[in-house]
Amino acid sequence: PEMFHAGSKFLDWKLGALNTVVLLFSSLTMALSIHYAQHNDKKKTLINLYITLICACIFMVVKYIEYTHKFHMGLYPGHYFHPHEAWVADIAAKYPNLAMYFSFYFCMTGLHGSHVLAGMGLIIWLIIRTHRGEFNSHYYTPLECVGLFWHLVDLIWIYLFFLTINWCCWSSSTHFRFLFNLFVNIFNFFISLLKNIFTNPLGRKITTNIWVNNLKCLNT
């Protein structure tokens, strides 16, 4: 815990919270793109896919800003850890395992970022296919599959955000209330999302539609 508390002092919780909001909003637009495809609204489907892609780009730009700031201070993972500033070196001297924290940090956030990049590629693929008019009320399985992947990426980020950021915020009651309320709102959002999936007739048929369409492709 001490290592995480010390390492998290070098993280900007505001940038993390911004990225959380951006990804949550992108989940909404991804879901809306599926909704409009189900209603044969090609224009709104494309608008929401483009917004989702823009949100992903914003997320990666913020991560780039965070990474470059840490690299500037010499906060590299593992044996590459070499603080450039005196006050950072003083903290590192008190916590010899601080480099391990940044190894965890870069490994987890880097792996998540690679999945965001993969999701961006899939969204571009969906945009191209939508422009071709391949999705309609009878066929939108690729949108659903990519949407499920994108929601999973968002859920993993929420976990990483609280894992890497919260240690530096528990000492401040104001920050704690903010993060606690944010977590409650996020939790309620996804509970509502899951409720809609399992109560909406279309939501209950997501898995069924995937298998039916795949079987049709195999038969043809």
Image (cartoon, rainbow, N blue to C red):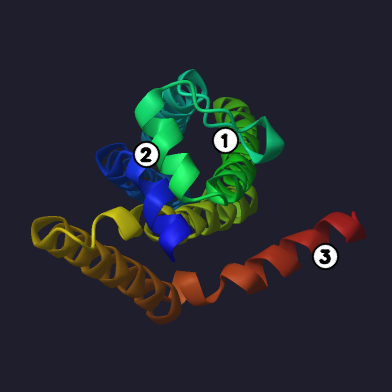
Please name whichever residue, 42 or 119, is drawn nearer the observer in this view of the structure.
Answer: 119
Picture coordinates of residue 28 (x, y %)? 34, 50
- Residue 2 position within the rendered picture, expressed as x and y whole percent measured from the top left: 42, 62
Q: Residue furthest left?
A: 174
Question: Which mark is drawn over residue 49?
Answer: none
Q: Which residue carries the number 3 mark?
A: 215
Say if mark 2 contacts mark 1, CB within 8 Å.
no
| Residue at the right extreme of this rendering | 219
Q: Which of marks 1 and 3 is nearer the N terminus?
A: 1
Point out the frontmost of discs 1 and 3: 1
The residues bearing labels 2 and 1 have C-alpha atoms spaced at a distance of 33 Å
Helix, strand or loop at mark 3: helix
Q: What residue type is labelled 3?
A: Leu
Closer to us: 164 or 100? 100
Of the two numbered discs 2 and 1 on the same chain, state the one appearing first in sequence: 2
Residue 10 visible in the snapshot: yes
Quadrant in the rendering for residue 174: bottom left
Q: Which residue is drawn at 23% across and 63% down?
A: 170
At a point 48% along the width and 29% down the height, the residue shown is 60
- Location of the N terminus (image quadrant): bottom left
